[in-house]
Image (cartoon, rainbow, N blue to C red):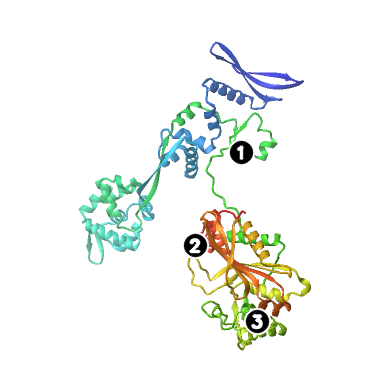
């Protein structure tokens, strides 16, 4: 018997419910705190407490109780119907829940290992658009026969039966085949004795429509005949391949049902109203299920290539470099001539360069710079060089191109400096364009990491130091600098890094010290300029484990969501 008692604790009075139960030869007292004041629904609370005490006698395991307390309302509602109903359709009908609610409940119960869901593909025959209409109004041929009164004109039959013209044509073919009508002169129709017999009982087709939906493999001979006849006609029946779901119960299901855990005192969802009216008191909250399957949410993020670009920019900025910028469209003067590339050099040909048709030519810079570049090409200027020893053409230098390298920005930046600006150092991460055939290792549009240091005190060791530090920050601790040739640097060097996974050296760019023929016409004085142009795509492809360089720019949403974040 449950009884109430007010207990005084440290000068405060509290209401409790008590119940004494026998446990072997001993008696145990069970209690439940209900508050400082008696709740209005005290009778309900007492009944629930009594149920809990009885449950305690059955010694419900902690695992079962916690499992029960984690069930969603959909799961709790559907659980009792699973014993006698195995298919999704049967469970929906028995529980009177929506199909989507039942489906979610079953998926969650499967996640908790209470049931397993078996899926089987089945071919189901069901009513089409016209089939639903005919099931309600009757088959067109039956309505046709019923509309015949003696000998009746076909138009009067059509109107009386409420048929469309195409339905009338179908009826004529079917009923003539069954010898149910005679067609007289002037399209007057008379019903035969056979036709009168057809009116007295439902046809195979009518019976079949009433039996749908049905699985195709379970058809009887009569049903197969009706199916073959009806599928020749428009929108009466349809066949669909559907996934049939059936439920198998696990052992824990019986333990859960036998436990009869009460859910009346469980709050499923906290709301402002529950907090305001304090109805949460003396109740517990549904356990949070951390194992439940939830939809995958893809948060907003930059494209992974842009993530890498931002990181590379930050590396150079942290090393004290300033970012240099410039247009993608450049004159040949800045792209080639200022970098001491002869006007008959093969790199200028259409095979390597995108020349612009409109506007075909651009403007040359300040006359002093143009004269310096012209002289260095023709006779070496004041550098001690002989130059290329040909007649330099301003017309060729004015041709517009899509920049073939970001080194063009280095040339323009040097030309804008004054002696008092030194020392200075700049970088850029920018696009350049080459007339390449696109394949797994080549693109016609690519990014280059460019850098220059203009300082009277620097030398080749400083160049090695900058490059080593940059690639260390990109995750390549081993860097190798080896001799090479580039037309506008001397000394020149290739930059390799050791790939920690592949265990091999990978070439990633070129570097060197600009020749006097580049620096003196642009800056006016001869100063050491460290320079490098590094391929970005190959370096970041290795980080992302991408073997085909084209995959960097596929703009595949799935790839962008799943690829790892750039973290170094």
Q: Distance between the residues labelled 1 and 2?
A: 50 Å
Callout 2: helix, strand or loop? loop
Q: Is residue 426 left or right of residue 480?
A: right
Q: How far apart are marks 3 and 2 (CA)?
A: 43 Å
Q: Hey, which quadrant is residue 455 in on the image? A: bottom right
Q: Label 1: few (<14), some or many (≥20) within 10 Å?
A: few
In the rendered view of the protein, which quadrant contains the C terminus?
bottom right
Please provide percent x and percent y for residue 211: 33, 45
Please provide percent x and percent y for residue 239: 35, 52
Q: Distance between the residues labelled 1 and 3?
A: 84 Å
Point out which mark residue 385 bears. Answer: 3
Cβ atoms under marks 1 and 2 closer than 8 Å: no
Residue depicted at x 68% and y 62%? 316
In the rendered view of the protein, which quadrant contains the N terminus?
top right
Of all residues shown, which one is farthest toward the front? 384
Of all residues shown, which one is farthest toward the right? 420
Callout 1: helix, strand or loop? loop
Callout 3: helix, strand or loop? loop
Please provide percent x and percent y for residue 318: 70, 59
User: Which residue carries the number 2 mark?
Assistant: 548
- Which label sits in the foreground, 3 or 2? 3
Q: Hey, which quadrant is residue 87 in on the image? A: top left
- Mark before the other along the chain sequence, 1 or 2: 1
Q: Is residue 238 left or right of residue 360?
A: left
- Which label sits in the foreground, 1 or 2? 2
Point out which mark residue 269 bears. Answer: 1
116 or 185, which is in the foreground?
116
292 or 224, which is in the foreground?
292
């Amino acid at each position: 018997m449950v009884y109430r008692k007010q207990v005084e604790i440290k000068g405060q009075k509290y209401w409790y419910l008590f119940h004494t139960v026998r446990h072997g030869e001993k008696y145990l007292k069970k209690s439940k705190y209900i508050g400082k004041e008696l709740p209005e629904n005290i009778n309900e609370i007492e009944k629930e407490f009594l149920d809990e005490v009885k449950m305690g006698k059955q010694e419900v395991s902690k695992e079962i109780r916690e499992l029960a307390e984690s069930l969603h309302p959909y799961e709790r509602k559907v659980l009792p119907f699973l014993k006698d109903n195995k298919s999704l359709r049967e469970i929906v009908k028995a529980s009177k829940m929506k199909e989507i609610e039942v489906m979610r409940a079953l998926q969650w119960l499967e996640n908790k290992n209470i049931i397993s869901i078996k899926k089987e593909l089945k071919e189901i025959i069901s009513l089409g658009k016209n089939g639903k209409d005919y099931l309600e109004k009757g088959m067109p041929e039956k309505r046709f026969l019923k509309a015949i009164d003696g000998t009746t004109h076909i138009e009067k039959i059509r109107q009386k039966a409420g048929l469309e013209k195409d339905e009338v044509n179908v009826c004529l073919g079917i009923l003539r085949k069954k010898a149910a009508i005679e067609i007289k002169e002037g399209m007057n129709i008379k019903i035969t004795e056979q036709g009168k017999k057809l009116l007295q009982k439902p046809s195979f087709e009518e019976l079949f429509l009433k039996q749908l939906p049905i699985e195709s493999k379970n058809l009887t001979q009569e049903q197969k005949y009706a199916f073959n006849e009806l599928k020749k006609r428009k929108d009466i029946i349809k066949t669909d391949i559907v996934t049939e779901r059936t439920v198998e119960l696990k052992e824990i299901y019986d333990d859960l049902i036998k436990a009869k855990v009460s859910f009346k005192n469980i709050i499923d969802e906290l709301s402002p109203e529950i907090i305001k009216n304090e109805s949460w008191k003396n109740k517990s909250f549904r356990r949070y299920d951390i194992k439940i399957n939830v939809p995958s949410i893809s948060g907003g993020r930059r494209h992974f290539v842009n993530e890498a670009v931002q990181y590379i920019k930050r590396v150079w900025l942290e090393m004290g470099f300033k970012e240099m910028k410039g247009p993608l469209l450049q004159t040949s003067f800045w792209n080639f001539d200022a970098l001491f590339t002869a006007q008959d050099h093969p790199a200028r040909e259409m095979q390597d360069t995108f020349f612009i048709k409109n506007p075909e030519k651009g403007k040359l810079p300040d006359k002093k710079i143009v004269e310096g570049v012209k002289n260095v090409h023709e006779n070496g200027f004041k550098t001690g060089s002989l130059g290329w020893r040909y007649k330099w053409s301003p017309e060729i230098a004015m041709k517009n191109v899509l920049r073939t390298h970001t080194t063009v920005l280095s040339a323009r930046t040097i030309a804008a400096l004054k002696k008092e600006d030194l020392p200075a150092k700049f970088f850029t991460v920018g696009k350049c364009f080459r007339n390449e055939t696109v394949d797994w290792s080549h693109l016609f549009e690519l990014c280059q990491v460019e850098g220059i240091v203009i300082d009277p005190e620097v030398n080749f060791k400083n160049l090695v130091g900058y490059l080593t530090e940059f690639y260390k920050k990109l995750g390549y601790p081993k860097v190798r600098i080896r001799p090479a040739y580039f037309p506008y640097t001397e000394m020149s060097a290739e930059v390799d890094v050791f790939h920690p996974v592949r265990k091999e050296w990978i070439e990633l760019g070129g570097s060197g010290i600009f020749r006097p023929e580049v620096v003196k016409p642009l800056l006016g004085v001869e100063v050491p300029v460290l320079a490098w142009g590094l391929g970005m795509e190959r370096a970041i492809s290795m980080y992302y484990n991408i073997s085909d360089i084209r995959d960097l720019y596929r703009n595949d949403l799935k790839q962008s969501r799943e690829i790892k974040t750039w973290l170094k």
